[in-house]
Amino acid sequence: MERRIDFSHQRHMLCGGCDHRFVVGLDWIDRWEQGGEKCLGCDLTGEHEDAPRVTVDPDDPALDDGRVAQFFWYHTSTQPDWPSRAFDPASGFTPEMRMRMGGVERVAAWAARQRAKALHVGTYEAAVHNMLRRMHDQADDGCQFYLYRVHLKPSVVVRKGWLIDPSDFVGDVVLGEFCPPGTDVARYLNYHEDPGGLSLALGRGAIDKVQQIAIPLSDAWDRDWARESVAALENASEALVPATGGLGRFMPPCSPRADLSRDLGRGLAADLPINLQSQLVSAVAFGEGADPVRWAKQASCLLSLIVDPSPVLVMLDQQERREV
Ligand SMILES: [Zn+2]
């Protein structure tokens, strides 16, 4: 069952100082993170350790144990066969890397720990947000991403209540810490991706089937915006110009074309919810020498994942449900 997709819905806050609960928009949270807002109950500001934090919406339907397995859950990955049974996290290691890690047995033990980690699925919004963050961090820049719609086994046992966002801890979380014996799935509150939303930590065994598409879709783009952007970019010089100004000497040289692409990216992101704007801008960063047509199309396709998810959902509906 699909839930309503809305990247800009209101968020619930809970103050650790005065226990006041209140509901705010993403713009309020953005100002609060920058010290520009106070708790509506007790005036605590964001830097205080008991300051209000986003919390779960008490009416979130995913709090209903019986409905967790009925909902569609999402995951984005650069792995084309997630969640692969044959996943070998050490497959890309060279003999030198294996030596440096302490030899064959050490590598095998490390790989076993990696495989024991929990899988994560969440709302559509959280999955898209996660992909943008990974593009923003550059580690996966230029990789093909896949969106997975995850169908859970109807028999899964859901751990009572919910846990705190594991990204607040150092390192990854081992499945057994999330899902004690007798449980298959644990809910946790997201602080960063779809803040306030509930994601799930689970093992492969909790997943019944997945549907998969490559994202962004290759034909969901704004042709008018792309045509105008390409014309402007082709008019801008590709020649590198040394940066000027006080900090300029620390910046790499940049072409007027790349400069313009940043402005176009900012314009594209301007109407998005505030917590996605800078991530979209850096996800669509223009590499010097890139093809303007390819760039404009890719940027517009990425935006459409957020502003109009319906073609994505239609495309997913058409995909076969693969057993994992
Ligand atoms: Zn308060």
Image (cartoon, rainbow, N blue to C red):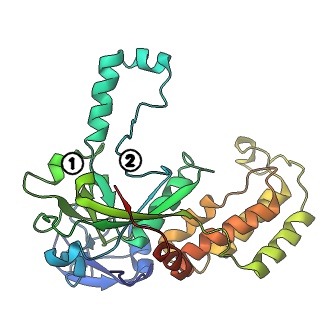
The number of numbered discs placed on residues in the rendered structure image is: 2
For disc 2, the marked residue is 84
Q: Residue flagged by tag 1: what amino acid is it?
A: Leu
Residue 99 position, x and y percent, is 42, 14
Q: Is residue 87 above or below residue 281?
A: above
For disc 1, the marked residue is 175
Please state, as top left, top right, bottom left or bottom right, where the N terminus lies in the image: bottom left
Q: Is mark 1 on a helix, strand or loop?
A: helix
Residue that sits furthest to the left in the current view: 182
Residue 147 position, x and y percent, is 48, 63
Residue 145 position, x and y percent, is 54, 57
Q: What element carries label 2?
A: loop
Q: How crowded is mark 1: few (under 14 residues within 10 Å), some or many (20 or more)?
A: some
Q: As drawn, is 70 to the left or to the right of 273?
A: left
Q: Which of the 4 image quarters holds residue 171?
A: top left
Q: Nearer the viewer, residue 33 or 183?
A: 183
Mark 2 or mark 1: whose residue is earlier in sequence: 2
Q: How crowded is mark 2: few (under 14 residues within 10 Å), some or many (20 or more)?
A: few
Q: Residue flagged by tag 2: what amino acid is it?
A: Ser
